[in-house]
Image (tube, rainbow, N blue to C red):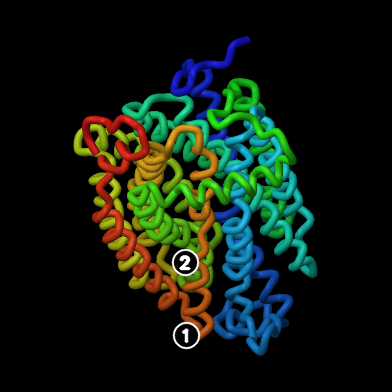
Amino acid sequence: MTAPAYGESTKRERVGWYFYDWANSAFSATIVAVFLGPYLSAIARSAAGCPDNTDACQAATLFHFAGIDFKAGGFYTLILSVAVGINVLILPVIGAIADRSAHKRRLLGIFAYIGAGATCGFFFVDAGRLWLGAALTIVATVAFAASIVVYQSFLPQLCPEDQRDKVSSYGWAFGYLGGGLLLVVNLAALQLLEDRLGTSLVVRLSMASAGIWWGLFTLLPLMRLRDRPPLEGVARGNVLTDGFKQLRHTLKGIRAYPITLLFLGAYLVYNDAIQTVINVSSIYGTEALKLSQDTLIITILIIQFLAFGGALGMGALAQRIGAKKTVLISLVLWTAIVGAAFSLPEGAPGPFMALGATVGLVLGGSQALSRSLFSQLIPKGKEAEYFGFYEISDKGTSWIGPLLFTAVFQFSGSYRVGIVSVLIPFIIGFVLLLLVPIRRGIVAAGNNPPPRL
């Protein structure tokens, strides 16, 4: 069967592409946003000999390294920072390999099932297996990000520039709906089975269910997506060494696209802040605000289902005023959200849920439109490689924010002070994005700019 032309696809193929968002969002919602942070933090406190959820136990020393006492309360964000540090090193190489491969679907499947398998492994992480949890967190996070690099590189191949805001928004909307549906199941399980089976077992079953969901629904995109011949030609030597060679070539050539680099820099800063809010929200809710697990799950459900409509709504707004203006508006709202989070009262679920509803309205749109904007700033045939840099901060992964949050917590012992530190990358990212001449950058990359930007 003849491969479809670049930028052309059927509705069947696009729906298959949407469903990888549906599949992998189980990891983002169930693992990253809800269960893993509080669960690993609780095991870390036990390992430090202070299992209670108190400020003193959060500040208990877990281990010593390089003359530093690492606290139990910062363990999860520390491990996340290690995982994302690995991503920084390998994702651009994975992107370079994907761009030279004629079997992009196969790469998507390999990374997806490594990640899904590691996620299922969280079932075996109980008290006394803290470092197994750390290892699985790293493997799952890296595999997740690698699969997203390959997945997102399909977007420019599926549709022309003027349709990417819409197609990207549909993908994000599908993802939030899928992740939300699995969370409904996990919420019901927690309510019905917690007293009978115990919190630990129900949480571990819920985390394993995310791996099963991820693996099961990945079958649909693997069946419907179609490989296209790489524009740069198929790699003929060793795949890994060829990927490194291609990466060196791109690092030299990317200087010819300074506007693309400026947008990438802006995105890496402001989206890192968005991902940090997602990553630490569950810890902030349980450790700083002393909210129950039920409250956190209900709030995440609110975010997931409102993000479905928010992604579509902001996609429609972008059609009227342009994607860049819409993203800038969302960043102003994000800054207000973080400021409000600092003053949330302890033990009051209502204000936390209301703030979560606001997050849902801006979350999907800001990410979907950023993805479509970046796809238009990439020279044809370099999609996966450029998305390798882009994925350094995307869908549940961040590195500046967690490091900043962990450092502030280490010195202050306060989660509230830590969350305020996230304002810095939001403000810097807004200013950088404001300076990006998007239309000129799209033309410089050899693409056709849509009517409104």
Residue indicated by mark 2: 401
Tell me what residue is drawn at x 51 percent, y 78 percent: 407
Q: Residue furthest top?
A: 1
Q: Which residue is mark 1?
A: 412
Q: Secondary structure at mark 1?
A: helix
Q: Secondary structure at mark 2?
A: helix
Viewer-proximal residue, 222 or 440? 440
Question: To which quarter of the image does residue 444 belong?
Answer: top left
* Marks 1 and 2, the one that precedes in the sequence: 2
> Residue 345's spot in the image, x, y percent?
37, 71
- Which residue is outermost to the left? 321
> Given the image, on which type of amino acid does mark 2 rest?
Gly
The percent position of residue 336, horizontal first and vertical second, equals 28, 62
Question: Pointer 1: residues within 10 angstroms few (<14), some, or many (20+)?
Answer: few
At 49% from the left edge and 55% from the top edge, which residue is drawn?
Answer: 393
Would residue 251 be found to the left or right of residue 85 on screen? Answer: left
User: Based on the displayed image, in which of its 4 quarters is residue 418 positioned?
Assistant: bottom left
